[in-house]
Amino acid sequence: MIIREVKIGFLDLALLAFCFWSTVRADEESMQLGILLDTSPEMGFIVPQARKEVRLLNANLEAAGRSPLVVREFSGASLGRPGALSLGATKNVAFTLKKLYEEDKVDLIYWITALGGTQSGNGIFFLEETVKEAGVGKSGERQLIIRNIWQEQIQSGSKWVNDIPRPETDPLNAENFPEEWYSAAKAGKGVIIRSWRLPPDDYRDQFAFPYEFRSSLIRRKMGLEGPTARMDQGWKIELEQKYDLKFMLNEERWLNEFPGRRGIRESTLVPFVSDESRSRRDDLLFAEMTGRESIEEDLKRIEAEKLGVLFGFGFLERDIQRLKSMKNRAIHERDMRMNYMKDLTRIVGETRAHVAENNGGDERVYVSEMVALSHSHTRSAEPGRYARRMADLVRKEGVDAIYFFTNGYTGGGEYGTFEVDVPLVAAAIREAGVRLFVRVPFEFSPIPIELQKLALASGGGVFLGEAGDPDWQVEIPQQAWPEVPDSTESDR
């Protein structure tokens, strides 16, 4: 059972069709897996996506006569011994872990978490002791998998290898408790699934490498030669045999960026039933994650005497030309670049139709900033373009709020890279007291947490998913202004 009330929506109706064609065989002897989902603000879009993926998976399992997964949610990963004075029961994940093993009788906890919060050595030792105890599920054992993931880490991609983050931003940094977490996973006969990080040397067997990765820096650290590294998948095969589920794509890699369509199709978050069922599941998931209000509905929720509306889109000129040359020919589902451009063209068309219907009057000022780039590499990036447009709206048009609808792309990488100069945006709006509201369609990218914090600090907000969708009821990050350099382009 799912331990969370969910209202019926588009995805629930689509599940009826999804269940009908499900080809998964019933297996009453398979062991029970439970999902523990971290719902802290740093998880971002991962929370609604995981909720939707689990519902799809459970519908498929029930259609095949199998038991659905148990799901519990808990904000953060603060961990201490039960009864520890430093953590109350509502803030100590130890109690939720015990409930999954003891009350829900799961054999395996699949913990999707940023591992953020306060952990004591005693707390992690308690976790290790807990997973060693006899289980009450079908296996009589307890197993633990930690899926260490959070939004900022996903969007940083390979930058986490070449530009090592501060220790406090990475729970598996050597200065924190990495070996203790790996030790707990080892005691639970499980693994830690994590992108763009290497385990301590003594815990290689507790790290779930993907099928292949190409990072030259990581290969050098591991003493591997060749342009790519293909890793042992024994951990994945063993889990598939135990739980009759797939825990990663056959040829999954660590992604450098996360445009919505590619992120769904080329990476995994929640285990799934089979490769055959996944394509249909991906279509349903993408349709649900991209649901949102119209631009006009967004704007009607913003109270402003004079509202600036900034549509900002970046792209590579050669991709526009290639898309035009294809005319009406079908785009292959694996051609992610052209699928991105198709989504971009459709959404830019939506903005133009909106302006044609609504432009005029003194209450709104519409501007568009199209960042046409010749190359995707860093030296061609123009992250300050949108901030300068905002500065013009503030100084020349006198707006008191800005609605920023964007794909966030200004070069610096492949599509899905979000390179907007957030400190420069802050400099453009802060002194004038202008509120910022942000909408980024899921097709393009998640809204960076730093930009969300800025929008909230300005008195504005962020538009996530579709209003009324319970899966998008997420904790918002704490508002904060970024550090602004002493001299910025907006001062010129």
Image (cartoon, rainbow, N blue to C red):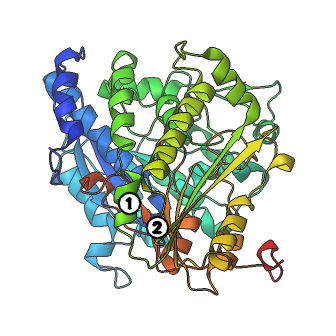
The reply, left or right, for residue 354 in relation to residue 348 is left
Which quarter of the picture shows residue 13?
top left
Q: Name the residue under label 2.
A: 361
SS label for mark 2? loop
Q: Name the residue under label 1.
A: 298
Is residue 233 positioned above or below 107 on the image?
A: above
Which x, y percent locates residue 467? 29, 57
Which quarter of the picture shows residue 319?
top right
Is residue 66 positioned above or below 466 on the image?
A: above
Which x, y percent locates residue 459? 47, 80
Which x, y percent locates residue 408? 62, 52
Q: Is residue 459 visible?
A: yes
**Does the residue at mark 1 contact the one at mark 2 (Cβ under 8 Å)?**
no
Q: Which residue lies furthest to the front in this view?
A: 361
In three-dimensional space, the C-alpha distance between marks 1 and 2, rounded to whole angstroms, equals 18 Å
**Which quadrant would the C terminus be assigned to in this image?**
bottom right
Tell which of 103 and 403 is nearer to you: 403
Amino acid carrying mark 2 in the image: Gly
Which quarter of the picture shows residue 366?
bottom right
**Which quadrant would the N terminus be assigned to in this image?**
top left
Amino acid carrying mark 1 in the image: Asp
10 Å crowding of disc 1: few (<14), some (14-19), many (20+): some
Image point (46%, 67%), residue name: 361
SS label for mark 1? helix
